[in-house]
Amino acid sequence: MEILLDEDVYGNTIFHELAEAGSRSLLERFARHKRDEFEPIIRQRNMYGESCVHVAAKTQTGPRAKTVMKLLKELGADLSATFNSWTVLHIAVQREEYELTRWLCYQNGVDKRAKNPDGLTAYEMACAMNNKKMIDLLKQYKADVQPAD
């Protein structure tokens, strides 16, 4: 269990590294154990302030992005965590990850009204990007709500 507590020079835990590698098989092995064993570790942030869900959102694409995010959630990762005011939903919209965006919009606890450092919600980002497909997707999941003040 001690190896799980190790961090690299950037403060990345094993879960940051598994998120970056997109290692579904290893994450599934962890998921067979009690969630509370890993929750404190999986919620740790690296020296940049990123949690493993931010790393996954920035590095994984297509169906793998959704699969990795789902496994991280099962292990106790916080889908509403922010990194410099960026949520995982903001990152997914910026990267035009439609499948991940759809999945995130369906999850409880994902704040669709959160603002990024530019003061934009994920929906407002999609509008600024003039991405009609993303705009329609976010509208479908009621993510076109007004931001909380």
Image: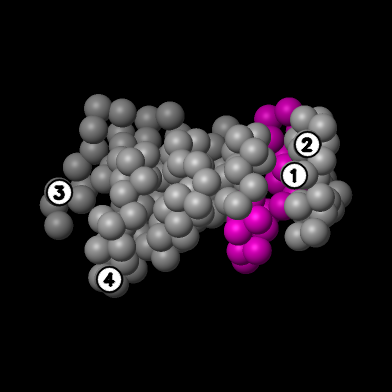
Q: Quadrant of residue 120?
A: top right
Q: Earlier in the sequence, mark 3 or mark 2?
A: 3
Q: Find out whether the residues at labels 1 and 2 contact each other: C-beta distance under 8 Å.
A: yes
**Above or below 102: residue 5:** above
Q: Cα distance, mark 4 to mark 1? A: 34 Å
Q: Secondary structure at mark 3?
A: helix
- Give the amino acid at mark 3: Ile
Residue pointed to by mark 3: 3
Residue pointed to by mark 4: 32
Q: Position of residue 59 (x, y in %)?
A: 45, 36
- Give the amino acid at mark 4: Arg
Q: Earlier in the sequence, mark 3 or mark 4?
A: 3
CA neighbours of label 3 inside 10 A, class few (<14), some (14 to 19), many (20+): few
Q: Find out whether the residues at labels 3 and 2 contact each other: C-beta distance under 8 Å.
A: no
**Above or below 113: residue 90:** above
Looking at the rendering, the stretch of residues picked out in magenta corresponds to 101-122
- Residue 131 numbered tag: 2
Q: Find out whether the residues at labels 3 and 1 contact each other: C-beta distance under 8 Å.
A: no
**Above or below 46: residue 140:** below
Q: Position of residue 97 (x, y in %)?
A: 60, 43
CA neighbours of label 1 inside 10 A, class few (<14), some (14 to 19), many (20+): many
Which one is in front, 102 or 76? 102
Q: Position of residue 37 (x, y in %)?
A: 27, 65
- Which one is in front in this view, the residue at disc 4 or the one at disc 1? 1
Q: Cα distance, mark 3 to mark 4? A: 18 Å
Q: Cα distance, mark 4 to mark 2? A: 39 Å
CA neighbours of label 2 inside 10 A, class few (<14), some (14 to 19), many (20+): some
Residue pointed to by mark 1: 134
